[in-house]
Amino acid sequence: METWVRVLILVGCLFPAFVECRVRHYKFNVVMKNTTRLCATKPIVTVNGKFPGPTIYAREDDIVLVKVVNHVKYNVSIHWHGVRQLRTGWADGPAYITQCPIQSGQSYVYNFTITGQRGTLLWHAHILWLRATVHGAIVILPKLGVPFPFPKPDHERVVILAEWWKSDTEDVINEAMKSGVAPNVSDAHTINGFPGLVPNCSSTKGYTLNVKPGKTYMLRVINAALNEELFFKIAGHKMTVVEVDATYVKPFKTDTILVAPGQTTNVILTADKGSGRYLVAAATFMDTPVVAIDNLTATAMLHYTGTLSSTPTMLTSPPPQNATPVANNFTNSLKSLNSKKYPAKVPIKVDHSLLFAVGLAVNPCPTCKAGNGSRVVADINNITFVMPTTALLQAHYFKIKGVFTTDFPGNPPFAFNYTGNPPANLQTNNGTKLYRLSYNATVQVVLQDTGIIAPENHPVHLHGFNFFAVGRGLGNFNPKTDPKTFNLVDPVERNTIGVPSGGWVAIRFRADNPGTLITLSTHLVLRHNSIVYLIRFCVQFCRGMVYALPFGSAHNMGTENGFLGGQWKGP
C-alpha cells in the first residue's frame, strides 16, 4: 500500500502537465482520552486525543488518504459522511456493510477522491456508539482559481454541534439493548466540544468565537449529534445561508437555522455590532411531546475583539422545542442555486417510484425484562435490518451467496393510516434485504413517517449519493395529488433529510455510481435502540464498464486492510 502511494505521488510530481500533485495525507490515531465535562471526568474514544476530532481539508478533485490506527479495545470504522465515493465504495466506512471494522491494534488506509463537491461535510465512527465522540469536519475548498458563488468571507470557522453523556456511551447502549427499552438521553449538548453554562456546574467552560468588527465569517455548522435535530442561533445577528451538505443554495437571511443529525449548513455572519459579547445557543427541535429529549441548551460566546470580559452578554433564547413553524420556514427556504455553473439536474422521468414507511415497531425479546419481553425496533416497510457477518459489498462483488436477498419491498406490505392509529400487529420481519437498481436508473423515494408507538422526525442519510428533496407534507402521502406540488426546478440538493413528524418527504436521485451499495439509513441511533433503518440499493454495473478494486480493499484479506479470512468478527 505505502509503495503504491509513493509511486502515485512521484508520478504526479514529475509529470504535473498530466497529473496534478494533490494528494492529502492524514493519520488518525484512535486513542482513549480522559475528558472532563459537566464537572465529571471519564475516558472517551477520540481521534488524535481531540474532541471533536481533527478537520480534514481538501480541494475538489483531491485524493485523500487517511490511515486509521486503532489503539483502543473497540473495533472501529470511519464513515466519510456525504462524500460521493464514486467507484470507491470500499472506502465509505460503514462497518459490516462496506468493510470489516478495524480491530484493536490494526490499521486501515481509506483512499478516495473528492469529485464534483465543494463545501462542508463530516466524518464519524460508524460502529457501536463511538460516533458520540469520534467525529470531525471535512472542509472541501473549490478548485484553485474557482471563486465561491457569493462574496468571499474574510474568515472561516468550523462549528460542530454534538451531545455528551456523563456515562460511558457503550454502557448506555448495551444496557438499552439488554433491557429492550430506549437508552437514556444525553446529559448535555455541546458546541465544539463544550456545553457552556449548565446548572450545578459553575466550572463548565464554553466555546468562544472571536470576531473582528466589520469582518465576515463563514460558519461551517455541523450536527454530529447521535439523535436530535438542533436549532442554532446567535444573539443580535442574522446569518446568510449559502450552502447545505456541500451544495450551494440560493442565499437567504435568517436568525435561526435547523440542522438535523448528519447535516451541515454554511452561513455567512457579518460582525456588524462593533463590540460586545453575544450568546450563541443550540437546542433541540422535537414536535412530538411524548418523545424523551435532552432539553439542555448548549451555549457559546461570540466575542468582539477589544471587548472587556466583564461586559454584559447580550442573551438570546432558541425557539421552543416544538417550534414547527420555525423549522418549516427554514426548511422551505432552502432552494438549489440552479445556476449555469451549478445546475439542479433533477430527474423528471422516474424509473423506480418507491414508498418507504419509516417508523418503529415492537418485536419479541424474551430476555428483555424491562421491556416486558419485547424490544422496540426500527423498520422500513415492516422489515427490520439484520446486520450480516460478511460484508455486503464484498458479497455483492464476489457473488457470495446466502448473505443477502434482493427482495426488499418497494412499498409497505399492506396499506394503513400511517400517521393515524397503528395496526394491531406491531411486529416486523427481520432480514438482510436489498433493492436492486439498474445503472443510471432514476429513483423517487417517498419517506413516510408512521404513528406506530409515536410519530417523530427521522433524519435519513443516503450513502454515496446526493438527492433532490422535491416535496414534503403532513399526513399521509397522496400519490395522485401530492406530486402536483413537487418542486422540479430548484429543489434543495443534499445527502441527509429530515422526515417530518407525522408527515412525508419525497426525494429523487440518479443511480450513477456503478457497483455500489447505496445505504439509506437513519441518523437517529438513540431512540431506536441502535437498531437503525437500513435499506441497501444495489446499483448494477453498466454494460462494458471495467470496475477496478483499489489497493487496500477486499481483494486483500489481510488484517492490515480490516479483513480476517473474508469474514468479519463481531464488534
Image (spheres, grey):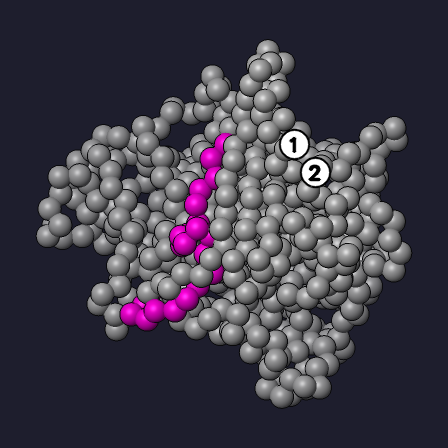
Image quadrant containing the N terminus: top right
Q: Disc 2 on helix, strand or loop?
A: loop
Q: Which image quadrant for residue 252?
A: top left
Q: Are marks 2 and 1 in contact (CB under 8 Å)?
A: yes
Rendered residue at 44%/61% (across/down) = 32
Q: Which residue is mark 1?
A: 4
Where 169 sits versus 398, above or below?
A: below
Rendered residue at 33%/60% (across/down) = 195
Closer to us: mark 2 or mark 1? 1
Q: Which residue is mark 2?
A: 551
Q: Which image quadrant for residue 545?
A: top right
Callout 1 amino acid? Trp
Other residues around mark 2 within 10 Å, as few (<14) / some (14–19) / many (≥20) = some
Q: Nearer the viewer, residue 407 or 403?
A: 403
Res 489 visible = no
Q: Which residues are magenta?
A: 37-58
Q: Is residue 303 magenta?
A: no
Callout 2 amino acid? Phe
Q: Nearer the viewer, residue 17 or 454?
A: 17
